[in-house]
Amino acid sequence: MRLYVLAAAFLALSTSTLANTIEDTAVAGLDKPAIYYADIEPHLKSAAKHPSVTLKQIGTSFQGQALNSLKIGTGPIKVMMWSQMHGDENTATAALMDFLSFITADENAQWLEKWQHKITLLIIPMVNPDGAAVQTRHNAQGIDLNRDAKALRTKEGQILMAAANEFKPDFGFNLHDQNAYYGAGKMGEQATISVLAPAYNEAREVNKIRGEAMQFIAHLAKTVETMIPGHLGKYNDSYSYRSFGDTFSEKGIRTILIESGAYPNDPNRQIARKVNRVLYKKTIDSITSQEWKSAKIAQYHAIPFNTKDNWVDLLIDDVTVKSELGDYQIDIAINNKGQSPIIKELGDISSIRQGYTSLDASNLNFRTGNSFVLNESLTLTENKYKELLIQGYSCFSGDINMLENSTNWPVYTCKSVFTSIPSLHAPAAFFLQANGKNKYAVLGAELINLD
């Protein structure tokens, strides 16, 4: 069994070029899968107590929640950062709260003094609070804000565009999350950070402004590669007419897209959060020193494009399926999306994808489970669930309301058809046998050793 486990010691990682303090500045309460406006409001108010920070409500969302900006510094070079245009993309918002904490810490006053008369920084930390409230990509109208840069039919889009038009940034940092399955190049590591200098026209031409955005990204890429080698990708640069990044690039803003992605054994993306806050400080330092100008566009082009669906949550490689029509071997891929994950893909998978958890099943056989009939109340603890799995039960029938699941493993009802062979989009609940005995249970993307 090949199980991808990475050392937690990474969280203590430091680089020689950046102060340890920015890496360690993680404000409390944001290590969780969802971040709401109520989570960041205390941090905004705390930052606003600092004499160099101006907190301003710049409007309200469709449902009346506040959209805020924070301005730091008075310098001629203007840097704008915005996050959580998509309500379920939380990582950069947490990193921005960390960065604000770092900026306003008393021990960093000398660092702040070095740049606050050279740079003006504008941060809009949650563009879509309504979407954040229900953890959906879209706003309360069902509109993707990042496809509203031209029509401006949303209040949130209007507010973001008005802020940019008034502030006139020299640099714009468009901060997003990407799904967990991107790879940094074909068969590369997980794309924990992806970057892009967005195109400003269909031809994807490189003018002076876009070229300088590429230089800046190439400069930041060195830091990413130092912290998480092999986990940096370049996002698809197809022109997106309606998107804010592309539109800001059209407007002559050096636009830098940073997409935060997954890292093994890091469900709340705390590794990407750390890298983000380090990059924000690196941005300020590099603009202050103009160090970024020494980077080459060729270094940007050398960053591998990220690859969609390069990773899956669970990859079972070469399991044998015994069928009345003949035996065969197959790979099974499962992604842990939704309450009851299903089989995502069947066939030759391991040649083009990798699994966060991978199992060499070349000596194992696929086997469907039995139905456990509920006729009285049952609370599933992990031990009880495992006991049922050992007995060969993989799904439940009868009165499902009598079942209480207190584990993190998914529960499957037997209303779905569990065929004797793996079926695409079928429930991901089955067994892997060795010598006629169930050796592993598969529940969603969970691989459970029954020995």
Image: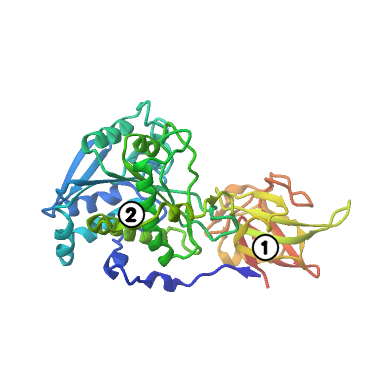
- Residue picked out by circle 2: 94
Label located before the other in sequence (1 or 2): 2
What separation in Å lies between label 1 and label 2 (alpha carbons)? 36 Å
The location of residue 411, given as percent across then percent down, is 60, 53
In the shown orientation, is residue 306 left or right of residue 243? Answer: right
Q: Residues within 10 Å of mark 1 (few under 14, many from 20)?
A: many
Work out whether 85 lies above or below 116.
above
Q: Quadrant of residue 19?
A: bottom left
What residue type is disc 2 on?
Ala
- Please name the residue shown 21% across and 58% down the image: 103
Q: Quadrant of the N terminus?
A: bottom right
Q: Quadrant of the C terminus?
A: bottom right
The location of residue 121, given as percent across then percent down, is 22, 48
The location of residue 335, given as percent across then percent down, is 59, 52
Q: Quadrant of residue 407?
A: bottom right
In the rendering, which numbered label is found on residue 441? 1
Q: Nearer the viewer, mark 1 or mark 2?
A: 2
- Please name the residue shown 70% across and 46% down the image: 424
Work out whether 186 lies above or below 16.
above
In the shown orientation, is residue 41 left or right of residue 214? Answer: left
